[in-house]
Structures are given as structure tokens and as C-alpha cells.
Image (tube, helix red, strand yellow):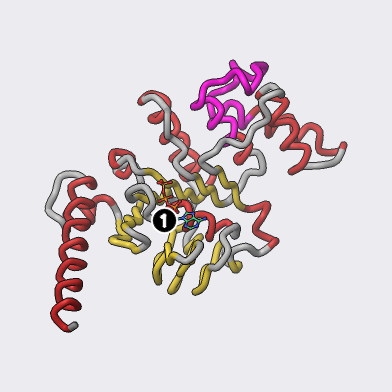
Amino acid sequence: MVNITGHAIEAHALTAVRGRRTVLRDLDFTVPRGQVTGLLGPSGCGKSTLMRAVVGTQAQVTGTLTVLGRPAGDASLRARIGYVTQAPSVYDDLTVRQNLDYFAAVLLPGRHRRDTRAEAVTRALSDVDLTSHADALAGNLSGGQRSRVSLAVALLGTPELLVLDEPTVGLDPVLRRDLWDLFHRLADERGVTLLVSSHVMDEAERCHRLLLMRAGELLADDTPEALRRRNDTPTVEGAFLRLVDAATAADATADTLQETRR
Ligand SMILES: Nc1ncnc2c1ncn2[C@@H]1O[C@H](COP(=O)(O)OP(=O)(O)OP(=O)(O)O)[C@@H](O)[C@H]1O
């Protein structure tokens, strides 16, 4: 067990504008080190935008966002963060191992690191359970297998922070469980911080902490246990639905007040 304290991510008044829309609105939150934090909310609520802000690829972000002690987007963070987008980034005309060899050569260049590269590739293949498919062409893999190749690429550089945008979409229940087991092993044994987005509520139960979002705002930043207790429901899904209903009712009241003032 790796004992790491402090926050991997700290956000204050984080706001992001895409086109003419404000898609993240004045967010304050922290993500503890060495834990699995889930980012949950309905499609379009801003999960990917928040992740892009964390890895420094989102334009028009204001507020303060500190990642591993540095401002988000700082060049020194590149090698410390692994980011997997929703669209798997693999070369279809290479085998799984060739894909990993290629990215390992970029991340760990130099002849003197040949053994380190080979070890990193072997470990990443085993981490995502693709050792038996190492010599298959990436173009011939299933969607779930391709997304696991992307995850393996992100693991090559032994990142301190892994940002995973809906990594379990399209996976069967066994693979989903195995991936969540891997996320916990990475946190427990290697001290990795994981920020994982999902809109599958049963996955929320597997997180140490949760950020629940709706329409660019945070509804909650808490542990699953505290969320269930505070909302008096047996599931995180129940808690989330209560929070959404309360926020919708508050919006409706605010709209009515505005109408009556006009
Ligand atoms: N290029 C863009 N210009 C304007 N608005 C955009 C752009 N890209 C995304 N948006 C809007 O920003 C909002 C947040 O999008 P985002 O992709 O962060 O949501 P999400 O929660 O990750 O959704 P999903 O779960 O479907 O991936 C959405 O309402 C979307 O329509």
C-alpha cells in the first residue's frame, strides 16, 4: 500500500466556455492523491470538458486549476499524466505490441533504455489483459479491446495521474469488473491517482470519491457512503436522482421568481 497524502487536483472557480456556451460554471473541488475519483453525470453535462481542462487541452478556461502541484497545462506535467479519450488512439495497421513499442519509443527514447521499454510494454499488456492478443492487428480488435490498447499506452510512462474518459463504454460486465479491479490496484499498489468519468451509476459505487455533475455544475463532491447516507438512499444512483430533482426544482423556482419580477 502506497501512502500518499494531499490533493492531486485542486480547482477554484473553474469555468470553461465552448463556443458561446459556458459549459463549466464556477467549480470548486479537489481530487485526493492515490485514490479513484469518479466523475459522473448525464451526457453533455461537461465531464469531458473538465477532463480536458485538467490535462491542459481545453481552451477558454478561467479560475485556478492546480494539477500535481503545477498549473494545469504546464509542460512539466506531460510525462506525469496519462490521458485516455473516448476515441481510442491506436494505429490499426500495427499489432497491439507494435503500437505499444511505438509509443514506448516516444516516451522512453534511447538505446540504453531498450530493456526498460520492453518491460514497460510487457507490464502494460498484462495490466489490461491483452498479452494473448499482443500480435493481433489493432484493426482486427473489438471496440473494447481497442480501448484497452489506449489504456495500455497511457500506462506505459507510469503516470502519477490517470485521466480516463469513459473507459468502460462498450465493455461486457466481466471486462468492466476487471478494469475497475485494475484501477484499484493502480491506486493501492502504485499510488496512482485516477479520475474516471462514467455515466453508469453502478460504477460510482466502486469509487473512493465522487464528483456528481449536472449541466456544468457540481451537485456533490463526496464519498459514495456519505452521499447515500445524506440522501437516505441505498444506492448512489438514488442519491444522484434526488440531487438532480432538487436542483431542477430550485431552477424552476428561480425561473418563476424571475418571471414574476418582469
Ligand atoms: N466545440 C464545442 N462548441 C460548443 N459547445 C460544445 C463543444 N463541444 C462540446 N460542447 C458542449 O459542451 C457541453 C459539455 O460537453 P462534454 O463533452 O464536456 O460533456 P460530457 O458530459 O463529457 O458528455 P458525454 O457523456 O456525452 O461525453 C455539451 O453541452 C456540449 O454540447
- Residue interval drawn in magenta: 123-151
Residue found at x 15% / y 63%: 249
Is 229 rendered above or below residue 100? Answer: below
Is 18 rendered above or below residue 130? Answer: below
Horizontal side of 128 relative to 90 (left or right) equals left
Nearer the observer, 179 or 247: 247
Residue found at x 47% / y 35%: 182
Residue at label 1? 46
Magenta stretch: includes residue 70: no
Nearer the observer, 86 or 64: 86
Nearer the observer, 242 or 163: 242
Horizontal side of 200 relative to 185 (left or right) equals left
Magenta-colored segment: predominant secondary structure: helix
Residue 93 position, x and y percent, is 71, 23
Disc 1 is placed on an element classified as loop
Furthest residue to the front? Answer: 262
Horizontal side of 258 relative to 13 (left or right) equals left
Magenta stretch: includes residue 150: yes
Residue 134 position, x and y percent, is 64, 20
Is label 1 within 8 A of ligand 1 (CB to nearest ligand atom)? yes
Q: Quadrant of the C terminus?
A: bottom left
Tag 1: Cα neighbours inside 10 Å, few (<14), some, or many (≥20)? many
